[in-house]
Image (cartoon, rainbow, N blue to C red):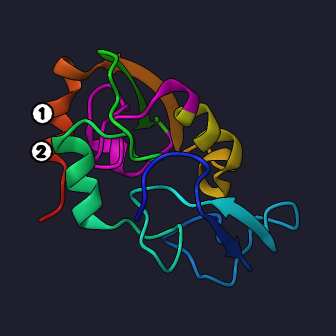
Amino acid sequence: MRRGYPRPRTYVEKTTANPYRSRSESYGKQWDDREYPHPYTAEEDGIAAIHQGRLKESITFKRCGTCGETVEDDLVGLIIYNNSSQIARDKSDGRVLHSESGPYHLKCLALNFTMCPHLANTKIYAPAVGLWKDVRQDIMDAIPY
């Protein structure tokens, strides 16, 4: 998949509000039957599944998960699980990093939370920022092998 902007577009016929529920549940009409920017770390055939190779490349080489370009700044955008996430309930502070947490350019993180139906329509995730040297290992540890 190519890097940079403009991002390729992907048509989403029907989306689901919760990945653990049936695919028949929709975000609602405002999100269905639209094209979305295709994130760099997403699989080619859809924006909901993560391409593990590009995810690892993103973390290893500090490439933005949205556009695929190198994130030059030390401060990176992050996606975190918040207190309402079942995954976070096992953690003491209720906020955890995961393999899709980052890095992101701050403008790309804003795009994620504006355009991604899953991120924009749930309370499971929250945008954040952090120093890459402080969060990189935690994100690396979360990569599923």
Magenta-drawn stretch contains 88: yes
Left or right: 7 in relation to 69: right
Q: Main secondary structure of the magenta part?
A: loop
Q: Quadrant of the N terminus?
A: bottom left
Graded by Cα atoms within 10 Å as few (under 14), some (14 to 19) or many (20 or more), the crowding at tag 2 reads few
For marks 1 and 2, give the CA distance: 6 Å
Which numbered disc covers residue 113? none
Left or right: 19 in relation to 36: left
Q: Amino acid at mark 1?
A: Gln
Left or right: 14 in relation to 52: right
Residue in view at x 32 percent, y 25 percent: 93
> Which quadrant of the structure image shows residue 101?
top left
Q: Amino acid at mark 2?
A: Asp
What's the magenta region? 84-107
Q: Position of residue 91 (x, y in %)?
A: 26, 35
Question: Are dots 1 and 2 in contact, CB under 8 Å?
Answer: yes
Foreground residue among 91 and 100? 100
Residue carrying label 1: 137
Q: Position of residue 58 (x, y in %)?
A: 27, 46
Q: Position of residue 143 (x, y in %)?
A: 18, 54
Q: Please, what secondary structure does the residue beneath circle 2 have? A: helix
Residue carrying label 2: 141
Q: Residue furthest right?
A: 29
Q: Position of residue 84 (x, y in %)?
A: 51, 42
Graded by Cα atoms within 10 Å as few (under 14), some (14 to 19) or many (20 or more), the crowding at tag 1 reads few
Q: Quadrant of the C terminus?
A: bottom left
Residue in view at x 59 percent, y 82 percent: 22
